[in-house]
Structures are given as C-alpha cells and as structure tokens.
Amino acid sequence: MTSTAIRVVTGPANYYSYPGALQELETLYTPAQLGSAVWIYGERAIAAATSFLPAAFTLAGAKHIAFGGHCSESAVAQLCAQAGDDRQVVIGVGGGALLDTAKVVARRLGLPLVAIPTIAATCAAWTPLSVWYNDEGQALRFEIFNDANHLVLVEPTIILRAPQEYLLAGIGDTLAKWYEAVVLSPQPENLPLTVRLGIEAALSIRNVLLNSSEQALADQRHGELTQAFLDVVDAIVAGGGMVGGLGERYTRVAAVHNGLTTLPQTEHFLHGTKVAYGILVQSELLGQRDVTEQLIAAFARFNLPTSLKALGVDIHNHADVEKVIARTLAPFELIHALSVPLSAESLRGAIERVEALSA
C-alpha cells in the first residue's frame, strides 16, 4: 500500500464556547500583551460584542481598526500598515470575511491570532485557512497557513442575537462537509486514519444539523439559549473546522460557490447559502437523485435556497448561467476532484435538473 501524505491541524490551540467565554482572553494573555494588541473588527460586530468583551479591549496602547471590506491583498496591506510596530497579538471580532482577513494580517505580522466570531455562518474562526477575494468580492483562491489559530472565543449569546440568515448559512456550509467528504473518499479504508476520523466526524455533524437545526432556528427566533442552539453553533464553528483539519483535501469541494460569485446579484447571499445550493448540483452531477431530494426537503424546512431562482439568478438567462459554468469549471477549481467526467453540458444539465426538482 502506498502512503498518503496528510497534514493534520485538528483545530486552534484553545477553544472556549460558553456564556462568558470572552473573559478567557485575560487568562491566556498578560495585560502587557493585550496592551499591545491589534483589534480588527466590523462596526456591527463590535457593537454586538462590546458588552461581552473584557476590560482589555479598552487598554491604552491597544490599536483598534474598523474594517468592512473583503480579504484582498490591498486590504491586508493597508491593515498591516495601520497596525504599526511592536504589536503582540491580533484579535479579530466579526464574521468570516473579517476573521479571514485578520488571520492573514496575523501571519504577515508574525503574531498569534485570537478569533472572536460574532456570527456562526462558517468555521472561519476555527480553521487556519483564509479565502482570498479581489476588491470586487469575487473569490480567487484559498490559502492554508502553517500554524493553527491560537485562541477562539465563542460567546453564544452574541450569536443568538445576530440575524438568523447567518446561522442558516452556517448550517448550509457545515451540512456540505459530509456530502463533500463522502464523494471524495469512496474507499476510505485505503486512506489514513485521520481522514477516516474526519469523515466520521462529518457524518456525526451532519446528523446533528439535520436533527437539531429546525429547533435551533426556532429557539433563536424566541431568543432562547438552548442545548439545540449551542449544539448547532459548535457544529458549525468547531465541527466544520475539525472535519477539514482531519480530512484535508478529502473534505473540500464547494462545487459551484465560486462560480456563483461571478454574478453581482448573488453577492448579498452568504457563502454558506451558496455552498448549500452547490451540494444539490453536486448530487445531480453524481447521479444521486435520492440525496438531492432528501436535501431539497431539508432545505425547505430550514429555508435554505433550493434553486438558482432563490439566489436571484434566472435559469433562462443564458449569459449568466454560462458565466457560472465557466468559472465553476476553471482548471484550478476543486470541483475537478469529483469522480465523474465534467463538461459544460453535464454541469448545465445538473443545474437544470435541480431547478426542475425545486419548482
């Protein structure tokens, strides 16, 4: 048997997720370190988090930078310049794009990264990976870092109070982990144990989400911090990231997400929402009609999109659909890891079948 090289980064050095977790910042860093921190945050994110932050946020000497752009080269360069010299830690407060940007800034400055997610839309806080975009918001590539994030602090009450569309996107993004992993690893017995553990974790997390998401979404609407809600938040932030850390390239596809980013009308839809739709197309590409139908039924219960129409795209607009197809099939895209021959015709057919099933 030939060996398969797999890099395992199971997660951050420290992870805390409970009401009051943000106070742990002052147990892992000294006042001197926090006084030389660079805080990078979104305006709405910091407004939501301020009442939960420890006193270290107001320490004299700490740098505070508001940021609202994409994780692009120009944005990272500007933030690094704003951070200045003699900093000791980068603390990101916000959603996935903000945290991806803070992760790159921390690596560029050679500093540890503290991630404080204010929404549960992706596993960005957990994973040592950033998705790069251009300044117009089109996805370019992802970058995997050589070190793990140092600290992740989840205050579930902040996430409970966030708009529900973010939790919904996180459910969609994390559900996809299993459906991506299972098609990339048709013979897991021939893969390293860590990959198999990642695949098993993806299955367990999928089950948590299919069984608990409806209740968690209802609990959020009622403002109730329940076990179902906590489970779903941890499944998204920690579980989704752990799957990628164990399974590496065997757990990542994101079939048509990047293609959808080429259309401006999809820009206001969140990453996980588009990833969830992509799994429907992937299932049709693979001839898995039972999976497509199961997911369409689940997505309907959760209010996730099951068609291009729901993403603001007209299936009859030939130019738009062809633009999505062309980018999705670009040579560098991960969709080529699927086990079936791909062509513009086969992808177009899968998209059209999903549209028909969702009508």
Image: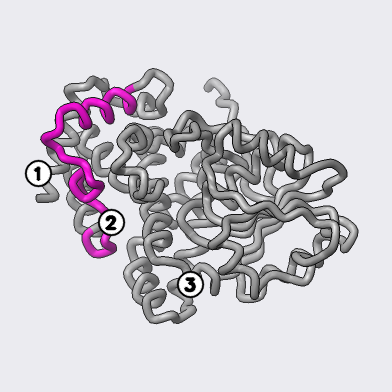
According to the image, label 2 marks what residue?
304
Q: Residue at x 60, y 37 (%)?
A: 75
> Which residue is pictured at 38% across the width and 40% down the height?
180
Q: Secondary structure at mark 2?
A: loop
Q: Which residue is mark 3?
A: 160
- Give the residue at x 22% y 31%: 320
Mark 3, secondary structure of its residue:
helix
Residue 85, percent from left and from top:
84, 41
- Foreground of the two, 170 or 7: 170
How many other residues sit within 10 Å of disc 1, few (<14), some (14-19) or many (≥20)?
Answer: few
Q: CA distance from mark 3 to mark 2?
A: 19 Å
How far is disc 1 from disc 2 in space, using C-alphas?
17 Å
In the rendered image, residue 354, in percent from the top left (x then y), is placed at: 16, 42
Q: Give the residue type that dot 2 points to.
A: Leu
Q: Nearer the viewer, residue 99 or 6?
A: 99
Decide which of tag 1 and tag 2 comes sooner along the chain.
Answer: 2
Left or right of 84? Residue 339 is: left
Q: Is residue 105 left or right of residue 346?
A: right
Q: Is residue 1 left or right of residue 102?
A: left
Q: Where, by quadrant of the figure, is residue 86 drawn?
A: top right
Whether residue 13 is situated above or below residue 20 in the rendered picture: above
Question: Which residue range is magenta in the image?
Answer: 300-329
Task: Tell me the residue that label 1 is attached to.
Answer: 356
Percent position of residue 274, x then y: 33, 45
